[in-house]
Amino acid sequence: MKLNEIVVQNFLSFYKLYRNNAFKKIKEFLSNQKEIFYENKISELQNNGLSKEEAVIKTRQGWVNVVGRSLEQIIEIIICDFCNKHKLKITNDKILKSKNLDEELNLVKRAILVDFGENCVLPDGDIIIYKIVEKRVKILAILSIKNSFRERYTETPYWKLKLAENNLTKDIKVFMITPDNDDEISFLGVNPKKSRIVMEYELDGIYLAKESFDESDKIKSIDKLIDDLGKLL
């Protein structure tokens, strides 16, 4: 079993313990999983001959990959029942970059391509929610999922702006989902951080997978995600 699959299995046990409140505790859950991962991985690498410093660096790089995919799968779990109930489908940009797509996924890809004149580019999309209406694809929302931002907070707003420029894609909602591990957008303080200002202004909604943060009309708890997706039907 892959490491990210282990994390997801651990989350399912976590969910049984906390039920729906588990979604607001995702940051807490991931912090615990990180500690376990670091302890085990650093020990393993040192036993294989790496120095403590080398082991820490490799472990840090490994966790970034593990937590990213794990978080995407956890969000898929959150929206699974909602999508099944309303006959919605999901895919992602990794799948859409594949060759030899079937007819349906090829239509999904074409429905979100961003036009750059001579070239068209697929926007980033960790989860793309769509439905089939009379054999036509309708994209409801693109979900961008990040554990933390650092200097990458402009990436998702950029794609939202590009989608908004074209009549064919302007109605696609772009949502961010994050535990905001480094508190880049969670709190207003005396002066809000640039990351919060930009993302709150440009995106259609930001859903925080944590318990403590400063809420607004657009920055909400992750348990509000399903309600807001329901408004798009």
Image (cartoon, grey):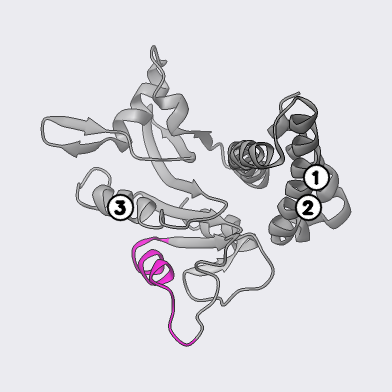
Q: Quadrant of residue 125?
A: top left
Q: Secondary structure at mark 3?
A: helix
Q: Earlier in the sequence, mark 2 or mark 3?
A: 2
Kind of residue indicated by mark 3 = Tyr
Labels 3 and 1: the sequence-earlier one: 1
Q: Is residue 17 shown left or right of residue 165? A: right
Can you say which quadrant of the picture contains the N terminus?
A: top right
Q: Are marks 2 and 3 in contact (CB under 8 Å)?
A: no
Q: Which residue is mark 3?
A: 158
Residue type at mark 2: give it.
Asn
Amino acid on which the number 1 mark rests in the picture: Ile
Tag 3 and tag 1, C-beta contact below 8 Å = no
Residue 188: give x, y in percent of width and height: 50, 80
Q: CA distance from mark 2 to mark 1?
A: 7 Å
Mark 2 → mark 3, Cα distance in angstroms: 32 Å
Residue in the image at 46% along x and 62% along y: 205
Left or right? Give the position of 28 relative to 92. right
Circle 2 residue: 32
* Marks 2 and 1 close (CB-CB < 8 Å): yes
Image location of residue 221, percent across then percent down: 61, 66
The circle on residue 187 is: none
Q: Is residue 18 positioned above or below 76 on the image? A: below
Residue 140 shown in magenta: no
* The quadrant where residue 183 appears: bottom right
| Residue 210 visible in the picture | yes
- Numbered circle sitting on residue 36: 1
Magenta residues (range):
190-204
Tell me if 111 is positioned left or right of 89 in this view. left
Residue in the image at 24% along x and 49% along y: 162
Disc 1 packing (10 Å; few <14; some 14–19; many ≥20): few
